[in-house]
Amino acid sequence: MASQHRPRAYPRPDLPPLDLSRVDLLSLIERDTRLKRVAATHGGEYAGPCPFCGGDDRFRVWPEHPDGRGQWWCRRCERGGDAVDYVRVRHNLDFVAACAWLGLDLPGREGRKGHSFDGAGQATKTESRGEEEPPVPPALDRDHQFVDGAPPTEEWRRAALKVVTQCETALWGAGGAKARAWLDARGLTEDTCQAWRLGYHGEDERIGDLYVPRGIVIPCFCEEALWYVKVRRPVPPLAGPKYWQVKGSKLTLFGLDRLVGQREIVICEGELDALLLRQLAGDLADVIAVAGASQRPNAQALLRLAEYRRWIVAFDHDDAGAQGADWWGFAARTRSVRPLQGKDLTDFHLAGGDLRSWIEFLLARESQPLAGTNVGQTAPKASPEAADLPEAAPAVPPEPAPAAPAPAEDTAGPSSVQYPVVLVWPADAKIAVINGQWRRLEDGRIEAIYHDRDELAWCIETTRLLRQG
């Protein structure tokens, strides 16, 4: 039962309670495992595999527990507690070091020696921090946030808009001079910064009800609604994560409502890379960012990308970027590229690379038609036919029409199937289809036409995403 979770115990009974209100327990734990909300118990109960024993669906987290601290517990290995306990177990730290890892000040320890953390998250002995900025609790852009197609609550949007407005004003004030110089050094113009409402926050503190760390503030608006607020922290010299997502944010594709309908779109990993590329080559191709290599767009976001003839995925030149780019390879229209120098597009630009010429070269190289593609076919517009898919809906194999090849035959390569192909699906199949390319037969079955393997792969992937959501 949820009520059986184990409350944490401090190593000393006389130790005053810690203020854990600014530690996002859910984000902290989701660095190591995937969680899903399963109940409303104790303010919201999340379940998933245990990061320690691997017990499947035996791990529980209550980030908004009434005790104000947040709690977690594994029913299998019997580990549990709050954020401090989690860091102690996860990183094999003592109590004081775990508090330092989370950036927590221990009451009664002012002026005493303690622990700090270097850029790799390694504990080191240090003198009292004094005026040094404390490390910020780690945050993670949660994959499950990308599934919900609705923006955050109106209450959160009001609070977050106050953050954006205050930080935007601060960036252009006297206190924002260093932040403006940093943005300028990365190649971003004042016009770009103002158009996208970038800001600056100079302290690790709350603005109203929302905790905002020190750094460059990056808001994401879509269809006039504020979806998320992210902070690019000065790491190094500060320890901890480079990016922090303000609690309550919900991910969407960055720049989704600024698309102008080019034939190609460049999909970047980070927001600042996308802003720089859009500034230099936005007239050549549309540009968006997915807010992290591990993020996966939901079906609604994927539908918005269906009109583009090419998806040029330009993620960072590291293992995470490679893994993230691999996911986009489900569609034949995808072309994965890496910056010619440095880790990301901004590094390439700062090393003297010409991003605009590079994009022109990529577009010219990709102008040849894809194998198996009917180049005369207009870009597909997807139908939300599968929008009401039940979560547990079983996969239904297609019933090929006479003389029509099944999708599985396409595994040998683009030339193994002659397109266009007509497939007939069972009447109760929940499958995404292309607008204007399907009809329901008299017996209820669904007849769909796919002009190339890209259309077919895209519909199948969209259906899979809808089933997950």
Image (cartoon, rainbow, N blue to C red):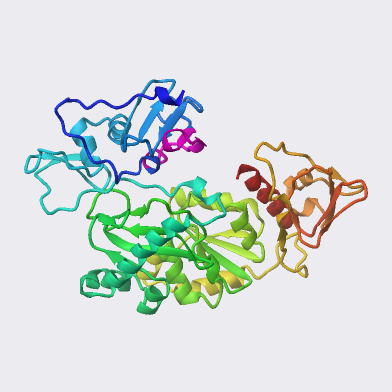
Closest to the observer, 222 or 140: 222
x 57%, y 49%: residue: 327
Residue 166 occupies which quadrant of the picture?
A: bottom left
Residue 162 occupies which quadrant of the picture?
A: bottom left
Q: Is residue 415 left or right of residue 277?
A: right
Q: Is residue 469 left or right of residue 235?
A: right
Q: Position of residue 74 (x, y in %)?
A: 41, 25
Can you say whether 324 is above or below 63 in the image? below
x 40%, y 22%: residue: 4
Can you say whether 61 is above or below 149 in the image? above
Q: Position of residue 289 (x, y in %)?
A: 49, 61
Total marks in image = 0
Q: Position of residue 139 (x, y in %)?
A: 36, 47
Closest to the observer, 260 or 328: 260
As drawn, the residue found furthest toward the left would be 111
Residue 142 on the magenta span? no
Q: Position of residue 400 (x, y in %)?
A: 86, 45
Residue 34 on the magenta span? yes
Can residue 342 be seen from the camera position used here?
Answer: no
x 58%, y 74%: residue: 260
User: In the rendered structure, which segment of residues is drawn in magenta?
Assistant: 28-47
x 40%, y 59%: residue: 229
Quarter of the image with the C terminus in it: top right
Q: Is residue 256 left or right of residue 215?
A: right
